[in-house]
């Protein structure tokens, strides 16, 4: 009741500032005519006029409630600019269904947005005890065609930790799927509990795509080729898909011990000379090879130009290279996969062998051993991390590798190494 009263008070403020049309008074006088009325008739007529005005205002008021009923309330601090605009246009479908668990935790599915790239679920978690951050459930979505995989999610917790507003992205349902089931599961004190909210999709509220095209363009990098396969833009976001290796290339490199394992692929999407805000993305290795997807904000309506820019690529590489070392050595420079490594010194202490090296900031020896008299010693730990930024902006990373054991002859056996390469390569994307 408190919520209803508060809402009505807010709507009263809107009504208070409404101005009746200038022609309304004239029309009412014309309808009454010039007939003389007794005091009683004038009183009755006044009541009729008042009733007409009340009905006029009530009609406006209900229209306002209906308009607000098409929007998802309480998510302004969670939505990005694009979602706020779509919400203002009433593009979301209000669901307003809840489930309460035995411990008092409740989940309300406030609404959804659907387009060709995703289904966005807007749901609120309430924890009366004020521990909502400790009671976050896992969320799944399924229809009669099976489960729709979750893609990303984020939310905001209020100061008292009693409520959290969430936005969760899922694969979009098929055109024939009307009834969907959102399942919530959480574990507390070693005990799991499940809940379900079933709802019907209103296809009239669903949105399609604004741009859909196969690209089939490649970007040459030192580590190979990055293939940009497709673009799919919708009112809620823009998705770029591509691959780094197909399954045959992946198998070939595995056999030859030359595998690369991508870590970071930084792509910027530029529309009308303005960079779009990235949303999420990911990489995976499966039977298709190494594939990736990057998601960005929605494209502008008056799209005139569209580019994709590669700025950084990082991968873990098979190296399998042995480097001879000499105790007491200082500043031995070596080159591995085009990357400069400085062996600052090699020394022994308390039955351990230490190797201090300096590399670029993004270069990491991810799998390294020390061969001491042909005996393999595993890396015990890395310590004394120091960073130095040069005038040209380059950042150097100096650290010490510790191995258990000593010997007379040493070789550093580098199996794998990660490094970052900076790029400035731009390709044009279709806009029709």
Image (cartoon, rainbow, N blue to C red):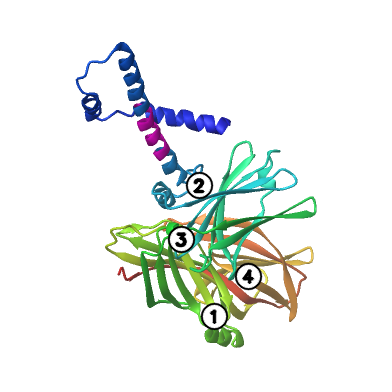
Question: Residue 218: x percent and y percent?
Answer: 40, 78
Residue on which the image places disc 4: 366
Q: Is residue 278 above or below residue 18?
A: below
Q: Residue at x 59, y 39 (%)?
A: 158
Residue 317 visible in the picture: no
Residue on which the image places disc 1: 288
Q: Which callout, 3 or 2, points at the residue further toward the start of the chain?
A: 2
In this picture, residue 250 sits left or right of residue 128: left
Alpha carbons under labels 1 and 2: distance apart: 35 Å
Q: Residue at x 61, y 75 (%)?
A: 416
Alpha carbons under labels 4 and 3: distance apart: 50 Å
Q: Which mark is residue 203?
A: 3
Residue on which the image places disc 2: 78
The secondary element bearing badge 4 is classed as strand
Question: Residue 169: x percent and y percent?
Answer: 53, 59
Q: Which callout, 4 or 3, points at the residue further toward the start of the chain?
A: 3
The secondary element bearing badge 2 is classed as loop
Q: Which mark is residue 430?
A: none
4 vs 3, front mark:
3
Cβ–Cβ below 8 Å for labels 3 and 2? Answer: no
Q: Which callout, 4 or 1, points at the residue further toward the start of the chain?
A: 1
């Amino acid at each position: 009741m408190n919520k209803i009263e508060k809402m009505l008070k807010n709507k009263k403020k809107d009504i208070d500032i409404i101005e009746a049309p200038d022609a309304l008074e004239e029309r009412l006088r014309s309808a009454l005519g010039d007939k003389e009325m007794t005091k009683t008739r004038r009183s009755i007529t006044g009541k009729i006029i008042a009733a007409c005005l009340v009905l006029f205002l009530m009609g406006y008021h209900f229209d306002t409630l209906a308009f607000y009923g098409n929007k998802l309330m309480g998510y302004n601090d969670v939505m990005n600019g694009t979602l706020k605009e779509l919400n203002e246009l009433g593009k979301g479908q209000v669901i307003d269904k809840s489930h309460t668990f035995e411990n008092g935790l409740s989940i309300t599915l406030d609404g959804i947005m659907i387009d060709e790239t995703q289904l966005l679920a807007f749901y609120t978690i309430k924890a009366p005890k004020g521990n909502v951050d400790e009671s976050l459930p896992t969320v799944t979505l399924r229809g009669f065609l099976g489960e729709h995989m979750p893609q990303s999610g984020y939310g905001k917790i209020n100061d008292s930790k009693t409520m959290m507003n969430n936005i969760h992205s899922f694969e979009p349902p098929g055109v024939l799927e009307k009834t969907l089931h959102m399942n919530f599961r959480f574990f507390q004190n070693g005990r799991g509990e499940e809940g379900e909210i079933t709802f019907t999709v209103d296809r009239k509220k669903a949105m399609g795509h604004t741009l859909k095209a196969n690209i089939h363009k490649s970007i040459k990098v030192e580590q190979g080729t990055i293939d940009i396969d497709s673009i799919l833009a919708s009112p809620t976001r823009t998705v770029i898909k591509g691959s780094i290796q197909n399954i045959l290339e992946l198998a070939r490199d595995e056999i030859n011990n030359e595998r690369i394992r991508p870590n970071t692929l930084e792509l910027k999407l530029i529309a009308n000379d303005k960079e779009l805000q990235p949303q999420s993305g990911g990489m995976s290795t499966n039977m298709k090879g190494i594939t990736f997807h990057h998601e960005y904000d929605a494209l502008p309506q008056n799209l005139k130009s569209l580019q994709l820019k590669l700025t950084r690529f990082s991968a873990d590489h098979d190296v399998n290279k042995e480097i001879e070392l000499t105790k007491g050595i200082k500043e031995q420079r070596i080159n591995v996969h085009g990357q400069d490594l400085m062996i600052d010194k090699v020394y022994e202490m308390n039955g351990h062998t230490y190797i201090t090296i300096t590399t670029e900031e993004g270069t990491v020896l991810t799998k390294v051993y020390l061969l001491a008299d042909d005996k393999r010693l595993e890396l015990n730990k890395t310590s004394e991390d120091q960073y130095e930024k040069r005038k040209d902006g380059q950042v150097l990373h100096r650290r010490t590798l510790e191995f258990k054991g000593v010997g007379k002859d040493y070789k550093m056996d580098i199996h794998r190494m990660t490094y970052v390469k900076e790029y400035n390569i731009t390709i044009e994307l279709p806009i029709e």
